[in-house]
């Protein structure tokens, strides 16, 4: 059970459970969430939907386990025509492996373009940043560190995971 004060992942945001409102709408109980990056944003979620659109933050043990898996998480083979849709699908999936797959794919595609002396696509840049934000924000919240420290934490333990600037 999620309790007041817990940090959780709500869709693509890291939130804190501020309160639980009893019989808020249609006699349903609701969680009231605040975005950790924008405390003025209040999100109300029915308890009945919480399990489908909210999840607990990753734990330190899960982070360490995930770090070991990162080299084995594959990039996605996608065409230029489907790239945006495929990235969106993976990001909506919400699993850490899917988000890492987007980071690795977009990063590799950017590097390949640079190696070929071509300009990296805006789509790859946008989804790379989006995936990085999702992943490192959760790591930062779970470890109680800032975003850049979270990136450094992962990069130093994996060798060279998404060091694109």
Image: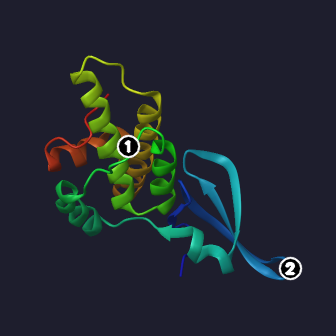
Viewer-side residue, 125 vs 21: 125
Residue 77 lies, in percent from the top left, at 32, 49
Tell which tag, 2 or 1, sits nearer the viewer.
2
Residue 29 lies, in percent from the top left, at 74, 79
Q: Is residue 129 above or below residue 122?
A: below
Compared across the picture, whether 56 is left or right of 40 comes to left
Name the element at disc 2: loop
Sequence-earlier tag: 2 or 1: 2
At label 2, counting other C-alpha atoms closer than 10 Å, the crowd grade (few under 14, some 14-19, many 20 or more) is few
Q: Is residue 105 above or below residue 58?
A: above
Q: Residue furthest right?
A: 26
Real-space Cα separation, disc 2 to disc 1, in angstroms: 39 Å
User: Where is mark 2, residue-wise?
Assistant: 26
Q: Is residue 115 above or below residue 109?
A: above
Residue 153 lies, in percent from the top left, at 23, 47
Q: Is residue 81 above or below residue 13?
A: above
Q: How is the image coloured?
A: rainbow
- The residue that appears at 39% across and 43% down in the rendered structure is 132
Viewer-side residue, 136 vs 111: 111
At label 1, counting other C-alpha atoms closer than 10 Å, the crowd grade (few under 14, some 14-19, many 20 or more) is few
Q: Residue furthest left?
A: 159
Compared across the picture, whether 103 is left or right of 91 comes to left
- The residue that appears at 46% across and 51% down in the rendered structure is 86
Q: Are marks 2 and 1 in contact (CB under 8 Å)?
A: no
User: Can residue 161 be seen from the camera position used here?
Assistant: yes
């Amino acid at each position: 059970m999620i309790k007041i004060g817990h940090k959780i992942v709500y869709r693509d945001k890291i939130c804190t459970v501020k309160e639980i409102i009893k019989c808020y709408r249609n006699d349903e109980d609701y969680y009231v969430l605040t975005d950790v990056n924008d405390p003025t944003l209040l999100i109300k979620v029915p308890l009945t939907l919480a399990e489908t659109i909210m999840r607990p933050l990753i734990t330190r043990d899960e982070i360490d386990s995930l770090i070991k898996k990162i080299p084995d998480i594959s990039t996605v083979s996608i065409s230029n025509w489907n790239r945006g849709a495929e990235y969106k699908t993976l990001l909506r999936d919400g699993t850490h492996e899917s988000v890492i797959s987007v980071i690795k794919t977009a990063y590799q595609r950017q590097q390949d373009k640079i190696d070929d002396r071509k300009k990296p696509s805006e789509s790859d840049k946008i989804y790379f940043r989006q995936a990085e934000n999702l992943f490192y924000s959760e790591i930062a919240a779970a470890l109680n560190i800032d975003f850049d420290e979270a990136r450094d934490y992962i990069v130093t333990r994996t060798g060279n995971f998404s060091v694109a600037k």
